[in-house]
Image (cartoon, rainbow, N blue to C red):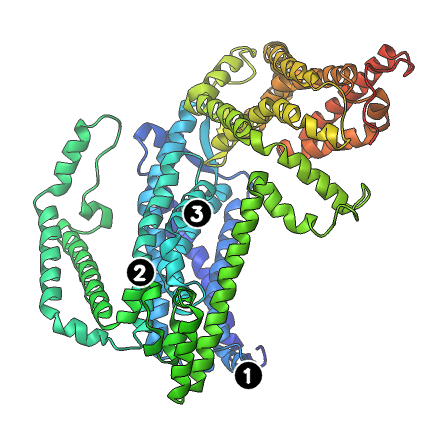
Amino acid sequence: MLRSAQQDLQKVFIAFVLGLVGTIWILQSFVWDRLKTDLFAGMSEEVREGTNVVTVSPFDVILLQVKIGLIVGAILSVPLFLYFSRDALRRRNWLPQAPIARWKMVFLVVAMLALFVGGIAYAYSVFFPIMFRFLASNAINAGFVPTYHIVKWVEFILLLSLSFGIASQLPLVMSTLAYADIVPYETFRDKWKHAIFGLYAGGAVFTPPDPITQLMWATPLVGLYAVSLQITKLVVGAKRSRGQVDVSETLRARWNVLAGTAITAFAVVYGFFSAGGVGAINEGLSMAPGDLGPVPTIGAALGLPESQAAALVAGVVAVMAVAIVGFRLVASQVQQEAGLAMATMGDPSAIDIGNLDKAGIEAAPPEAFEALEEHEAMAHVNEAIGNGNTDKAELILDRYDEANERAQNRQDATAEGGEEGDSGVVSETATGVVDAFTEEETTEDDIGGYMYDLRFILESLTSKAFRLVAVFMAVLAGSFMYLYSGGIGDIRRDFLRRLPADKIDQGDIAVLHPVEHLVFEIKVSALLAVVAVLPLVLYYVWPALKERGWAAGDRRTLLVWGGSLVVGISVGSYIGYSFVAPAVMSWLASDAINAHMVVRYRVNTFGWLLVFTTVGIGLLAEIPITMLLFYRGGLVSYERMRSGWRVVVLAFFALAAVVTPGGMFSLLMVAIPAALAYLLGLGILWLYTLGGRRKGPLTPATT
């Protein structure tokens, strides 16, 4: 590729440099101020004044501009490089061998760009202003300062913008996959519930964890999916009709309908803006509860005179209306001309295989052949042979065999699911691994033996899964809603009142990422939910562990242990909240204040330090209590605890690396006290067992 494009590499390099330098200049001259103005436009004046975008390093802005410039330069130069190296790609069969009409390529590229730009435009003009208004208001109401780090802020914006741009490609992706027979149109049509669930799940992944922004991300895409389904139906129908529909002739024959649609749409939209429709909407919003704010006029939004802006928007709406009506006219024509395509999409069994040519048989859905009886298929084969069309006869046999094999596989899967329906999802996913080892071949030292044991143990939880999930979600949702609805602000204000007045001011906890405080709330809620559900999990899984020889003792000990968790965490949290945490915070802030520095903690680090010095005190106290309870209940022997101390300490460090914020100090601050608490528990047990000579009430498992 390099040799093929070597004469044009200077042009590629020039495009890259222009993209890099031009992006840096545009960002410096126009983007930064405009970006903050537009995206913070939905905030009230008070919230907007309290929200800032800051740098924490002298090189933040310039390095960010260079990174964005490199990306833009690559986007501009890579397609150019591929174009100049097309001869090398063609020699290696990496390009389509059949000639592609230039207008088709232009249409595809324009459609991709239009959809991508449309998705980003929606995010920029609608989604981001509402989202940032909510995030900043929520942070300020909790007593935090929305001080966004410019790198984190821009990366957050780019990620969400990219997600909108990619998701807006649904019409092209669906129609292309269906046209190429990679994913049949019927799959998109029949699996629409799964698609909607996936889109809302994507909203939960890409957006902040609040229902408003998730709905704003996913709901337009659900509508786009419905539109994409209609476009896919048209494309596939046109393919199955084998080109019998002339699109241009269809549109010319109904020019009067298209012209009337354009005139009506233009007149309605232009009349709405000219008659003061925006003012009427603002009057209604002013009477509605809440701070919905006035809707800007179309001229102010576009930066044009009102009449020109209204005419521009009316023209765009008219074009869109003509496109929609034209699409429906063409779809109607396809439905009339392509009886195979549209009639059989709803009922594949209605396809007459005998009337299809070879191309029609290749394009027909598999359900058409599944509906055939053997004698019907052979009749079509004999008819094709009698007409001298052996290729068609062979293709009918191939498609019929494939359909039978597909139906048989589906029946086998259904039968297996019925026999093992009570085993749940875990058994279905583990079946392939476990079945590789028969019971006679597995031992406790084989991976098959361990997989069999794990499968048996996990299956014992399936009947209790609803209770476990209900408890987990109840604690998670209750904790998050308390923190989300102002609880985190109440805790912050109450805690800061316990500190000396000269240590930390009331507004010195900053949010450097737009969703930092929400993510912190979710993590704390998830931690509480795990603590709440862990005793129940162990209680329900205990019989299976005991049967497989992995545990022994009285499982009622676990209920006592669960109660001790609640009491220990409650008492420890009170002690930590009242005495330990204020002392630690004051000590940490003293040096900075004495050096005349401004103390401003991040909500992530400040919050986790508060959690570790409150709830963490209870958890540390619970470690020796747990060891003593497990020994008394015969669950774990003193010898097992003593011999496995290295593994336990290593597990503490691994867990601390996962749950603590970044940094070696926070990791050590959690892992070392936990390890010392475990060693303290060993010391207490050594005294209690008289150096290991006193045995427990039950003989624990030796596995």
Q: Earlier in the sequence, mark 1 or mark 3?
A: 1
Q: CA distance from mark 1 to mark 3?
A: 40 Å
Q: How many marks?
A: 3
User: Percent x, y for residue 648?
Assistant: 77, 29
Q: Specify the quadrant of the image occupied by residue 392.
A: bottom left
Residue 342: assigned label: none
- Viewer-nearest residue: 145 or 290: 290
Q: Which secondary structure lies at badge 3?
A: helix
| Residue pointed to by mark 1 | 91
Q: Which secondary structure lies at badge 1?
A: helix
| Residue pointed to by mark 3 | 198
Q: Which secondary structure lies at badge 2?
A: helix
Residue 346: assigned label: 2
- Viewer-nearest residue: 162 or 648: 648
Q: CA distance from mark 3 to mark 2?
A: 24 Å
Q: Is residue 605 visible?
A: yes
Residue 485 falls left or right of residue 686: left
Location of the N terminus by quadrant is bottom right
> Few, some or many C-alpha atoms within 10 Å of disc 2 (few <14, some 14-19, many ≥20)?
few
Q: Residue at x 36, y 80 (%)?
A: 357
Location of the C terminus by quadrant is top right
Residue 278 falls left or right of residue 78: left
Kindly report which numbered mark, 1 or 3, lies closer to the viewer in this rendering: 3
